[in-house]
Each structure stands twice: as structure tokens, then as C-alpha cells.
Image (spheres, rainbow, N blue to C red):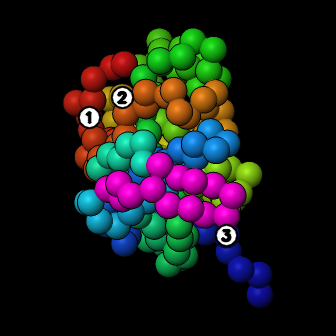
Amino acid sequence: MAKEKCEHTWQMINVADGMIVMKKCFHCSKVSTCFAFHHEPPLEPNRDGVHFWNFMESDESFHFDLECTACGTIVKLDELVGLMMCTGCDGKCRVHSIRYAYQQENTRVCIALGRRPIDERKQLSPEKFAVLEEFINQQNKSAKSPVKLVDQQLVRNLAKCYTEPIRDVNRLFSIDAQAE
């Protein structure tokens, strides 16, 4: 007997507060990002291989996984550092172009920020990104200001990016969210 395909309905599970931490290597100028499950920024410099990481900034955020309420499938989002709202700070950035394209639809553009440096850290797989995007789209059905999810690789220069971190799920899907 063939298995029926599930019409996934995703919900957040394992929601935890913490912070997005950004560091910069003074040797190569790469930016590192990670999620910390605490609220104390790591201010001390540290060495990791060829990198000499110095604290740049941190911001409150949250971490979560997704579970399908229909079939029980769990998708762990360990590679996701946080969700960031595009503010349109760099006219040459591809994310800004997407934001501009969706401006008339009152759609906010959200970046799925993963671990950086991109070429040195495990990233969200296309399958996990698709599940996250499906979850966002399911939540958008009742939102007055829908959200378009984009990949972090579209950000021109994260060190000069003024995105706004999403601090909690209510901020992401708030029906009272201001149009950008």
C-alpha cells in the first residue's frame, strides 16, 4: 500500500530565548554569527583556527524547531541563527531589491540568517529552508503584513547591514506590524 503524502501544517516547538552574536576576525575581516542560548554577550576575543574573533554586536532573538501537526515530522533548525527584517539600508544589496519589489504588496522581507562564515559553517539545507518558508507562508494567511523569506546569501555585506532582528514570534507575524 502506498503512503499518502502529508499536507504539512507546521508549528513551532522547542522555542528558546537567547541572542544572535556577531564577531569579526581582525585578521581576515570575515563575520561570524551564532545563536547563544543565554543573554550575556561573549565580549572576550577568541581564536578559532586561523580566525581571531572580536565581539561586534549581539541582539535578543529566539530559536525554534518546526513540527508537522498532521504527521509529527520534526525539522531541527540548528543551522538557523535567527530571522532578520530587512530595513533597506543598502540600495546595492539584492535583499533591498526584493524588498523594493514587494513594497506595493505591504510585504516585509525577512532574512533567514544562518551561521557565518558561510563557506566554513553548515548551512540550512534547501529542504529545511523550504520547510521554514512553508511555515512562514502558512502564518502569513492571517497577517495584514505578510513576510517574504530570503536566504542570507543574498545579503551584500553583513558587516554593514542594518537589519532588525526578530526578537520573538509575535514581532514576526504581528497583524499590527508597521509597513516598511
Determine whether label 1 and label 2 are within 8 Å by CB: yes
Amino acid at circle 2: Ser
Q: Secondary structure at mark 3?
A: loop
Q: Residue reaching furthest right? A: 1
136 to the left or right of 129:
left
Q: Which residues are magenta?
A: 41-54
Looking at the image, is mark 1 or mark 3 earlier in the sequence? 3
Indicate the quadrant containing the C terminus: top left, top right, bottom left or bottom right.
top left
Q: Which residue in the protein does label 3 denote? A: 5
Determine whether label 1 and label 3 are within 8 Å by CB: no
Say which of marks 2 and 3 sits in front: 2
| Residue beneath the point at 32% across and 29% down | 144
Q: Residue 77, position in %: x, y?
A: 53, 64
In which quadrant of the rendered view does residue 107 lie? top left
Q: Which residue in the protein does label 2 denote? A: 145
33 to the left or right of 162:
right
Looking at the image, is mark 1 or mark 2 earlier in the sequence? 2
Amino acid at circle 3: Lys
Is residue 58 visible in this depiction of the protein?
yes
Q: Residue 97, position in %: x, y?
A: 61, 17
Q: CA distance from mark 1 to mark 2?
A: 6 Å
Amino acid at circle 1: Ile
